[in-house]
Image: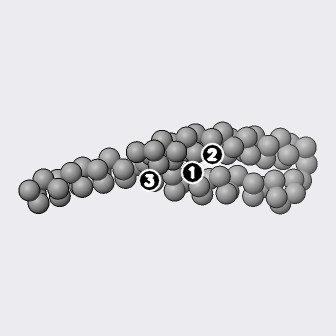
Amino acid sequence: MISNLWIRQAHRWLSILFVGAVIANFVAMALGEPPLWVVYAPLPPLILLMFTGLYMFVLPYAVRWRGSASQDAT
């Protein structure tokens, strides 16, 4: 249960980091040709957001599946 809360909190902070990286990307593009590290900066948080988001998406189905499997065993 604690890990679920940790995943949700990490997802929230990653979203803030991602939005900040995207804003920095737009600002850098407005000022001229941005360096590659600014262009690719949003990708690591985005990849981590994908994994945490998929985990939270599948979690209710996994709990339901696990619950029906334990009821079938009894």
Q: Tag 2 or tag 1, which sits nearer the N-term? A: 2
Residue labelled with disc 3: 55
Disc 2: which residue? 14
Mark 1 touches mark 2? (CB < 8 Å): yes
Residue at screen point 12% across, 53% down: 71
**Who's the residue at 81% across and 53% down the image?**
38
Which residue is at the far right? 32
Q: Give the percent coordinates (x, y) of residue 31.
A: 91, 43
How far apart, in angstroms, are the residues tagged by discs 1 and 2? Answer: 6 Å
Residue that mark 1 sits on: 49
* Residue in front for this viewpoint, 64 or 29: 64
User: Residue 11 in the image: x percent, y percent?
Assistant: 56, 44
Near mark 1 (Cα within 10 A), the count class, few <14, some 14-19 or many ≥20, is some
Q: Is residue 26 visible?
A: no
Q: Could you say which quadrant of the image residue 9 lies in?
A: top right
59 or 73, nearer to the observer: 73
**What amino acid does circle 1 point to?**
Leu
The N terminus: image quadrant: top left
Report how far apart the C-alphas of labels 2 and 3 lie in the structure.
14 Å
Task: Give the distance between the C-alpha atoms of the residues marked 3 and 1, in whole angstroms.
Answer: 10 Å
The quarter of the picture where the C terminus appears is: bottom left
Residue 40 shown left or right of residue 53 in the figure: right
